[in-house]
Amino acid sequence: MKAKLAALPMSYRLAVTSRVLAAVFGGYLVAALASVTLTVWLPLNRAEAVVTGMTVSFLVYLVAVLWCFACRSAWSAWVGLLVPSVIMATVSGVARGLGYA
Amino acid sequence: MKEGFRQAMAWLHTWAGLLFGWLLFAIFLTGTLAYFKDETNHWMQPEIPARALNAEASLTLAQHYLQQHAPDASRWIIGLPDARDPGLKVRWQQSAAKPGERGQFTSKILDAQTGAELQLRESMGGEFFYRFHFQLQMPYPWGRWLSTIAAMVMFVALISGIITHKKIFKDFFTFRPRKGQRSWLDGHNALGVLVLPFHLMITYSSLVIFMSMVMPASILASYGTNVRAFYDEVFPASNVPEKANQAAALAPMAPLLGKAREQWSGGEAGWVSVNNPGDANASVVVSRSGSDRVVHDFGSAVTFNGVSGQILAASPQQPLAMAIAGGFYGLHMGHFAGPVLRWLYFIVGLAGTAMIGTGLVIWLGKRQLKHARSGVMPFELRLVEVLNIASMAGLVGAVAVFFWANRLLPVSLAGRADWEINAFFMAWGLSVVHAVLRPGRKAWIEQLALAAALFAALPVLNGLTTPYHLGVTLIQGDWALAGFDLTCLATGLFLTWAAWKMWRAGATARLKKTPRETARPITLEQGAN
Amino acid sequence: MLLALLLCYAGFTALCLAMPRHHDELLGGKPSRRRRRGLVLAGWLLLGLSLWAAVSSKDWGLGLVDWFAVLMVSALALVLLLPYRPRLALALAGVSLLGSPVAAWAMN
């Protein structure tokens, strides 16, 4: 194992670390933003929308984590998480601005 | 990470599974044991007699007891006996000395038929396994966070495992024993696929149970700093009237149970709490037990005026979103399960535990093959081996030690309940030391054999130290106690078989200098790495 | 719950026999196309019936939980029995089929 690990190039190790960080923290960010966006846009009363958003967020987290390890490069892992994050942040921000929440 | 979606998922499955496997094994095993929490409690505190159930009579006894022993308390909480938990539990909270402070709680357990206070050995009982499986014996909230993170990793490992397993339907009924690594993989796949509905339910529901702790963004976005308001809306607590500071006798509470049942179309009461007993504004909250429905509803209660017995409020129907979350909670806990379904829960829980265990064994076995010839194991593999042994065989042995401690520690020992838990962790710690000192297979065999002996001897120890042995419990038909002893016996036999298998596999491996498996490592479909 | 369990076990055995490899192991020889189709149909029908049996004796919530439980446990039992006691596995399926009308009658 050690010999094999040592044989792995530094760039590979950095890429794996980057993917893991993207999956754990980026994935959490996407999941949290998804729960907020759902809460803001669902036509339910406040408490129900919050509970629904939280319940669904773990599925989003799951997909985000799978994406981070399935995509072609560590860069695309980050891009694939940050783009939807920005979109969801904008969408829920707009809803806030319009006075939905 | 090599190319290809399936390979990427195999990589993820392998490493996520390895890093959290030991912790998940412990969580799954103790969680599975927690399905028999009440039965374990009963065995560990056998002084509580099982009586015929009569909620009204028990409630009256509890009311008498509390009126005598805690007339000035600010709150009484009464837990009614049920088929699994025979004790009548009373708890009261002293009025706070200063406003703003929380009064002290006192708990007692009464005989459900006579109302007499029971003298019990101190013990956490099955509650220990239940608490451990989501708090991990860590200070709040770290254990809950860690176990929820482990649940998320489990979720990822499950889904990536399904994607990895390409012949999921073709291999649906396949298990080929006595083929070394192949059999472990077959077993891992079969346990994963056949019990998949349970795995998905238990993993996802554990995330839902702690969702407001780990995923609070939407609460914060909608409620800002007023998080309290969220909980008030989700769990609509009935408004309890303020203390009037005017003495008035509390009405007999037994008739309130019937009124509550009418509200629930037959559902049974589980808990009764009384606010400000003896005050003119006393109120009685009768909470529904979760044992007759799948969907759990925390707030399902009827509130009565404590003096007149009039209904003040009944909690409304759950909205759909909360019912879904409550459904996951209820499915995870299985409070509604009768004896047969409870056993099935236990069996599939063990299957989940075994799936994790086989996964850990496969990870190591595959890598060990490469070093089988040289006989020298690199440090990483040795570390995994030690952790495998201690986290599986060691934990099972520690569970047995926990039960032994319950029967052997003197009843008068101060902090007895804590010493039972200390014994558990000391045994677990010793298993790590033992696994470090002994070669891998020997450590497995010795720890499994020791655990087997401890479990198989438990019914004997029980017979020697208490009057509640199998000869009595079987005849009386106390199936909780008898079932516990018999299950320990069966566990002992199973572990003996496992130790024997290990021993025999080791003996044949020594006989054939070059076993076929090591000469020709099979390619495993999960072996992307 | 017993009826659901019996039907589930019989259903899974039929589905298992519909696979050529298992048919060969258990009964010897590959099944004909028609036989395979019949077994698959019978298997799914039995599983469907067991769902009905589980749900009809209780409400939907508890019935579904029961059904999933017997589904998992019967499949586990079958897969565990197949390599060690294949004849017993088959015999149990036969007993399940014969016993299910009795269980159904006892249920009512």
Image (cartoon, rainbow, N blue to C red):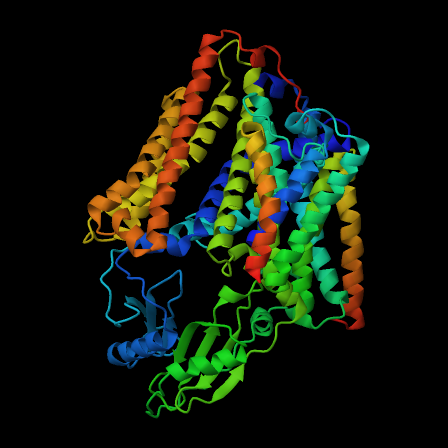
Left or right side of A90 for B452: left
Quadrant housing residue B109 = bottom left
Residue B86 appears anywhere in the view: yes
Q: Position of residue B271 (x, y in %)?
A: 42, 72
Quarter holding the C terminus of chain A is bottom right
Residue at left 41%, top 54%? Answer: B37
**Residue B197 shows in the view:** no
Q: Is residue A1 above or below residue C89?
A: above
Camera-nearest residue between B14 and B259: B259
Percent x, y for residue B375? 49, 11
Q: Quadrant of the N terminus of chain A?
A: top right
| Residue in the picture at 57% in, 48% down | C99
Is A6 on the left or on the right of A11, as rendered? left
- Measured from the top left, where is residue B388 in percent x and y? 47, 30
Which image quadrant for residue A7?
Answer: top right
Q: Position of residue C28 (x, y in %)?
A: 68, 25
- The residue closer to the viewer here, C19 or B123, is C19
What residue is shown at x 34% (from left), y 63% (from top)? B86
Residue found at the very far top of the displayed protein: B513
Location of residue B258 by image quarter: bottom left
Residue occupying the point 77% across, 27% down = B3
Q: Is residue A36 above or below residue A7?
A: below
Number of labels in the image equals: 0
Q: Is B315 situated left or right of A75 in this image? A: left
